[in-house]
Image: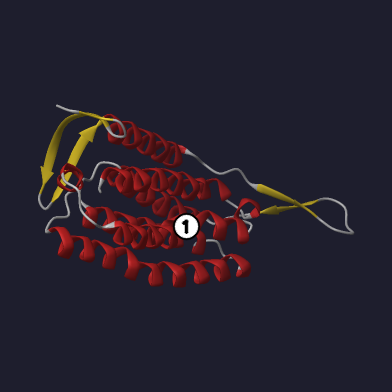
Amino acid sequence: MFMDPITGNFYGYIPFGDIIFYLTDFSMIAFLVALFFTLVVYLTKPEQQLEAQINDFGDKLNIVSLKELKIRRLMAIICGISTAFAMLTGDIFDYALFLAVVGIANIGIVSAVKKEWVLNAAYHYGIIAIISSLPLFGAAALILAKTGTLSIFELSKTSHDIFYQKIIYAVGMVGETGIAPFYAAKAEMFRAPGAPYILMIHLSSLLIIIRTAEILLTIH
């Protein structure tokens, strides 16, 4: 067991096929936070939304179908679970895979809203996410070619000249999941019926940005 200024104490690892989960103070706390909010999303039932009418009296009640809510909640749960396991993985490529799943789930959360302006924002975000998969996975391939390993802890033991690869990896992360809250805000998702599920986008983006910063500061 060792002490790292960023990750904290190392308690061990759990092999799960090709994916290895490392248990540290940082990863376990982030994992539990993501699981907790995923459970909150699962148990939450959105309230019906009232919209004030312009030049008219009374409010309009927006009704969201059960089918639409189920899709949105499913995508939010997938997003939360993928974010939780992204906090534990100790492999650069596996982390990129979890980010890709989170990005797909975020698109699903936004696109499940049957509003034209929301679907438009989801379409634009989907294009950015697809484009960002190239620098994300490309940087992982470049790191493997340069160092011969994708293990975060192996990369942290010795020094490697991978500064530019880390920049490309960060760019891919930003495009894949980091900009998701901006598109949710652009689509005015907080005004859309059943909006509470959109909070998972903000939580996942926050945790992934922190986790990516931790990874890029750990490997060198």
In the image: residue 47, left or right of residue 30: right
- Tell me, what colour scheme is on the image? secondary structure
In the image: residue 190, left or right of residue 208: right
Q: In this orientation, which residue lies closer to the viewer: 84 or 2? A: 2
How many residues crowd around disc 1 within 10 Å: few (fewer than 14), some, or many (20 or more)?
many
Which quadrant would the N terminus be assigned to in this image? top left
Going 47% across and 50% down the picture, which residue do you hit? 201
Q: In this orientation, which residue lies closer to the viewer: 146 or 120? A: 146
Going 22% across and 65% down the picture, which residue do you hit? 142
Query: 27 above or below 120?
Result: above
Q: Amino acid at mark 1?
A: Ile
Q: In this orientation, which residue lies closer to the viewer: 150 or 59? A: 150
In the image: residue 173, left or right of residue 151: right
Q: In this orientation, which residue lies closer to the viewer: 67 or 76? A: 76
Query: 41 above or below 168?
Result: above
Instruction: Tell me residue 108's x, y (percent).
Output: 44, 61
Going 16% across and 65% down the picture, which residue do you hit? 145
Instruction: Tell me residue 48's x, y (percent).
Output: 63, 46
Instruction: Tell me residue 178's x, y (percent).
Output: 45, 55
Instruction: Tell me residue 202's x, y (percent).
Output: 50, 47
Which residue is label 1 attached to?
Answer: 109
Query: What is the count of numbered marks?
Result: 1
Going 49% across and 39% down the picture, which residue do you hit? 44
Task: Give the SS element for disc 1.
Answer: helix
